[in-house]
């Protein structure tokens, strides 16, 4: 693909087929975890925490305990007259006593009369994507582009929307889970949208990370691996964005969601014809129907800079 303004070739070979979202059976279910054993270990650590504070003349009692997939937060209620900063300065000593890799102290917990002491779980839970996708939080998500991002500190499914963060940059050290996060985002979108309502453009300079999606019917173009081709792909995306702005303006709507809602309600939408000579190879005229969202996915952005 060169850097001309021609539209990327649509890779859908069966454009007339009415697609469905993938079945959940394609994803593995959550692993069983011995919660009783975990509770016993955490209860013992809670007692160790209070005893260690007492050795520093910090009288306190143990409040509630919140256990998430990776971290548990103990609520420590200081005795009357005990200053909060006396607990806040003991993170290293508490980590040593509880045999934890690290300890994070929240002093105080907002809205609570307690200090939070967070430690890594003795047996971290692997957050299962299928479990989050099947959760009511994802099914009832109001946004058009919901993302199943994981679980919060309380172990509840955490769902956000790509509409609220349309220019996401995922950063982190090697092995910190960037690619896992990227795959989670793509899978979330595919499990909510068919190719009729979502199209994907993928750029993968390493040629291995996004190749698993090469047969995905949502692709607007084959996965691009050459930075020179990527430049043309992104240039087309900018042109398409500007065309869509014109179409939204012509129909007095502010978003794709509002436009598509009118289409589904049977409203006849105005066509927007951009300036350009007749017969121009990329002359774009809206015909009818809904407008699919277009999401551009770039793996290893640094490798795509030119």
Image: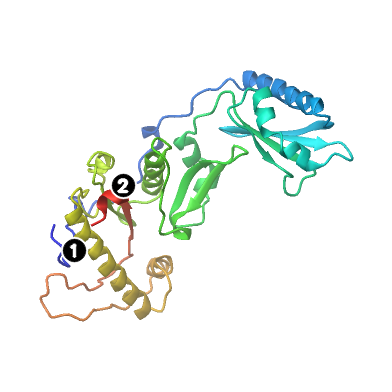
Whole-percent x, y for residue 170 in the image: 41, 48
Q: Nearer the viewer, residue 121 or 184?
A: 121
Q: In the displayed structure, would residue 180 be above or below residue 196? A: above
Q: Which mark's residue is nearer the viewer, 2 or 1?
A: 2
Q: Which image quadrant is residue 102 in?
A: top right
Write the residue at 43% across / 73% down. Answer: 254
Mark 2 lies on a secondary structure that is loop
Q: As drawn, which residue projects farthest toward the left?
A: 279
Q: Is residue 294 left or right of residue 94?
A: left
Whole-percent x, y for residue 27 in the image: 39, 33
Write the residue at 28% across / 67% down. Answer: 238
Q: Nearer the viewer, residue 19 or 76?
A: 76
Q: Is residue 131 left or right of residue 89?
A: left
Residue 299 seen in render: no
Q: Quadrant of the N terminus?
A: bottom left
Q: Nearer the viewer, residue 76 or 128?
A: 76
Residue 158 seen in render: yes
Q: Which image quadrant is residue 68 in?
A: top right
Whole-percent x, y for residue 107 in the image: 72, 43
Write the residue at 75% across / 40% down. Answer: 115
Q: Which image quadrant is residue 35 in?
A: top right
Query: Mark 2 Cα within 10 Å, few/some/many (few <14, many 20+)?
Result: some
Label 2, label 1: how many angstroms apart (C-alpha)?
Answer: 24 Å
Question: Which mark is on residue 300?
Answer: 2
Whole-percent x, y for residue 157 in the image: 55, 41
Q: Earlier in the sequence, mark 2 or mark 1?
A: 1
Query: Mark 1 Cα within 10 Å, few/some/many (few <14, many 20+)?
Result: many
User: To which residue does mark 1 refer?
Assistant: 7
């Amino acid at each position: 693909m060169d850097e001309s303004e021609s539209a990327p070739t649509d890779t859908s070979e069966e454009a007339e087929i009415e697609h469905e979202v993938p079945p959940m059976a394609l994803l593995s279910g959550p692993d069983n975890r011995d919660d009783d054993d975990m509770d016993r270990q955490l209860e013992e650590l809670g007692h160790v925490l209070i005893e260690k504070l007492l050795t520093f003349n910090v009288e306190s009692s143990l409040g509630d305990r919140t256990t998430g997939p990776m971290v548990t937060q103990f609520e420590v209620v200081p005795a009357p007259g005990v200053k909060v900063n006396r607990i806040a300065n003991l993170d290293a000593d508490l980590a040593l006593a509880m045999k934890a890799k690290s300890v994070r102290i929240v002093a105080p917990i907002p809205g609570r009369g307690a200090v939070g002491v967070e430690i890594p779980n003795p047996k971290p839970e692997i957050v299962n994507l299928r479990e989050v996708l099947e959760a009511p939080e994802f099914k009832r998500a109001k946004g058009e582009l919901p993302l199943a991002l994981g679980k919060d500190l309380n172990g509840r499914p955490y769902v956000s929307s790509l509409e609220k963060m349309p220019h996401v940059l995922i950063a982190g050290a090697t092995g910190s889970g960037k690619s896992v996060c990227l795959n989670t985002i793509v899978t979330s979108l595919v499990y909510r949208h068919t190719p009729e309502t979502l199209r994907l453009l993928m750029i993968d300079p390493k040629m291995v990370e996004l190749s698993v999606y090469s047969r995905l019917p949502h692709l607007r173009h084959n996965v691009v691996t050459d930075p020179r081709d990527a430049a043309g792909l992104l240039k087309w995306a900018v042109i398409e964005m500007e065309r869509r702005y014109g179409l939204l303006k012509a129909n007095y709507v502010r978003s794709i969601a509002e436009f598509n809602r009118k289409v589904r309600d049977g409203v006849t939408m105005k066509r927007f014809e951009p300036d350009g000579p007749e017969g121009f190879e990329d002359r774009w005229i809206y015909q009818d129907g809904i407008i699919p969202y277009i999401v551009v996915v770039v793996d290893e952005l640094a490798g795509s800079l030119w």
